[in-house]
Amino acid sequence: MKTDVLIVGSGCSGLYCALQLPEDKKITIITKSDVESSDSYLAQGGICMLKNDADYDSYFEDTMKAGHYENRKESVDIMIRSSREIIDDLVSYGVDFEKKNGEFCYTREGAHSKPRILFHEDITGKEITQTLLDQVKTKENIEICEYMTMVDIISKDNICGGVIAMDAKNNVYPIRSQFVVLACGGIGGLFQNSTNYPHIAGDGLGIAMKHQVKLEHLDYIQIHPTTLFSHKPGRRFLISESVRGEGALLYDKNGQRFTNELQPRDLLSQAIFEQMEKDGTDFVWEDMRPLGEKTIMQHFPNIYQHCIEEGFDPRKEPIPVVPAQHYFMGGIQADLSSRTSMRGLYACGETSCNGVHGKNRLASNSLLESLVFARRAADDMIFGEAPEMCRPDRLDLNQYEDQNVILEGYHKQVLNEIERMKKANE
């Protein structure tokens, strides 16, 4: 197969990047599962927007402070200043953000000094990603291949020339492309407790390591402080930061508040872990009753319904919550145009590390960052200097027999590197 641009991943960054490219380019999107099983669909809280010029300093400081001032200032500046244009673009596609009297409604989340977050009920990620997918499906130049897993990169002399993909039956497909965009998500599948889909497990990182593509901060892993406690196996259901932003409280086993609910996620997670250890419990309690029944039912209907299915009515009682792996701030090193250290290879979204988030992501910056730098990748492919054509040696496809075995090898490498970086930074 040959294509002009190959995008690995069907989350918001991959879809938005495809939509920013000219319609005379053949664009192929491959995705490991069905097209809707991306973590972008799971984002509940919302997407940040610079409300006005007076909010810039506050928004910048909130992002830097949450990231322990390890953020790349240029990246943060670009994200914030691009936010209004991105939101205008999403609205033009049909994304339906909450409004009152024709004006955007803003909510606040942990570590934000002001309300600046747009939302659609408590399924903002789904609203944005589904709208982008609907737009992609109208484009004749964009093809989506589901259940197609990247298992390697085609390259020579540090120039990317495509990827090796395998389908569910282990058939092997070399896909040639001058440009490749890795938008293949985070690393949640490597953890027992995670809010992520289990199949999204850092494949791109392992493949990048194999080809000496530069990685950064693999040990910067965010724990979300409040996921619904359950004895059931599988992905943990996230209780959005917005719930606490709107006034929900956290209690210990005796029903007493024990911390500030609006701290940055890493500090709040630490406080919850300490309280659980002190109480000898597997969870703490989150009380949504201060929000009032109207807010619970109108702003958080999806969360309400899921709690009911687990046997809890958040209108009448606290719900049990526990921290779980949620987001990945590290990844494949990317510059301000989302270029990696391999020519022709880009990375955006959670699999990339462009420095926006520093050591800890500020709530609701993820969707915005993914979209801003997906567009910058597209702009660089259109207006930047094109890489030389990759002319790889003859491909030995016999080495790709069982994708599960291949991916397990990558996952082991990634976990080992995470542990190595953790110890190096202790």
Image (tube, rainbow, N blue to C red):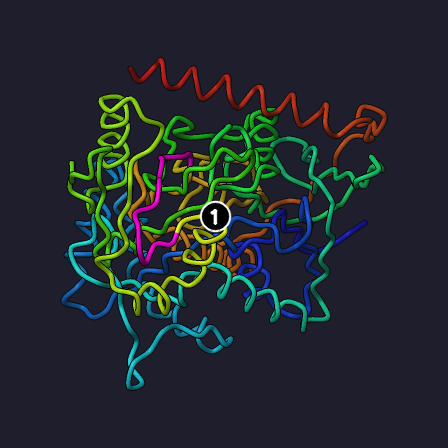
Q: Which residues are magenta?
A: 313-325
Tell me if residue 148 is in the magenta stretch: no
**Looking at the image, which residue is at 36% across and 35% down?**
322
Measuring from the top left, give residue 87's x and y in whole percent: 39, 69
- Toward the bottom, the furthest residue is 101
On the picture, is 254 further left or further right than 14? left
Q: Indicate the secondary structure of the residue bearing disc 1.
A: helix
On the picture, is 405 further left or further right than 120? right
On the picture, is 330 further left or further right than 168? left
- Quarter assignment of residue 133: bottom right
**Looking at the image, which residue is at 28% across and 86% down?**
101
Query: Which amino acid does the dot numbered 1 rest on?
Result: Gly
Looking at the picture, does residue 1 appear above or below residue 225? below
**Quadrant the C terminus occupies:** top left
Q: Alpha-carbon neighbours of circle 1 within 10 Å: few (<14), some, or many (≥20)? A: many
**Looking at the image, which residue is at 75% across and 30% down?**
403
Measuring from the top left, give residue 18's x and y in whole percent: 59, 61
**Looking at the image, which residue is at 81% across and 49% down?**
1
- Quarter assignment of residue 84: bottom left
Nearer the observer, 203 or 108: 108
Looking at the picture, does residue 284 appear above or below residue 42? above
Nearer the observer, 293 or 192: 293
Nearer the observer, 397 or 351: 351
On the picture, is 199 further left or further right than 105? right
Q: Which residue is mark 1?
A: 349
Measuring from the top left, give residue 159's x and y in whole percent: 62, 37
Q: Total of numbered circles in the picture?
A: 1
Measuring from the top left, give residue 102's x and y in whole percent: 31, 85
Tell me if residue 314 is in the magenta stretch: yes
